[in-house]
Amino acid sequence: MQKERECCLHKTKERSNVESKALLHRLNRIEGQIRGIKGMVERDAYCTDILMQASAANAALNSFCCALLSEHIRTCVTNDIREGREETVEELLVVLRKLMK
């Protein structure tokens, strides 16, 4: 547990193999979606078809951010608050404001 707290303090985080694999799997799927959209543009696909695929990619990226944010709150933020580093709450609020734009 100490190692994780040190990592969060230094703006890095060691992730378990399971967490890393899950995040990378999501990103690989999103990357595939983006390549598919690029191919649609190259093939002159109909605008609304491209928009629907872009919307799906956007939803997948939002889902990725939600999963990452949830884990961040459960680990880094919680640990920092327990250790009296209240500035982490301000950092979280800044991130939330940016995510909600």
Image: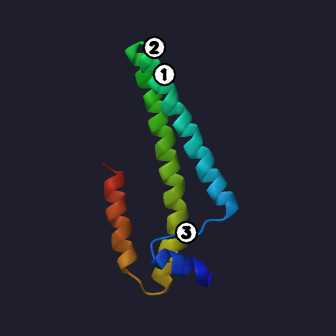
* Rendered residue at 32%/55% (across/down): 98
Q: Secondary structure at mark 2?
A: loop
| Residue denoted by label 2 | 43
Give the x, y percent position of residue 39. Answer: 48, 21
Q: Position of residue 56 (x, y in %)?
A: 49, 32
* 57 lies left or right of 95: right
Amino acid type of disc 2? Arg
Q: How many marks?
A: 3
- Mark 2 and mark 1: span between their CA atoms? 6 Å
**Mark 2 and 3 residues: CB-CB less than 8 Å, in contact?**
no
Amino acid found under the numbered disc labelled 3? Arg
Nearer to us: label 3 or label 1: 1
Residue 2: quarter of image: bottom right
Comparing marks 2 and 3, which lies closer to the viewer?
2
Q: Which mark is residue 39?
A: 1
How far apart marks 3 and 1 lie (CA) works out to: 38 Å
Q: Which mark is residue 74?
A: 3
Residue, far front: 42
Q: Is residue 25 above or below residue 56?
A: below
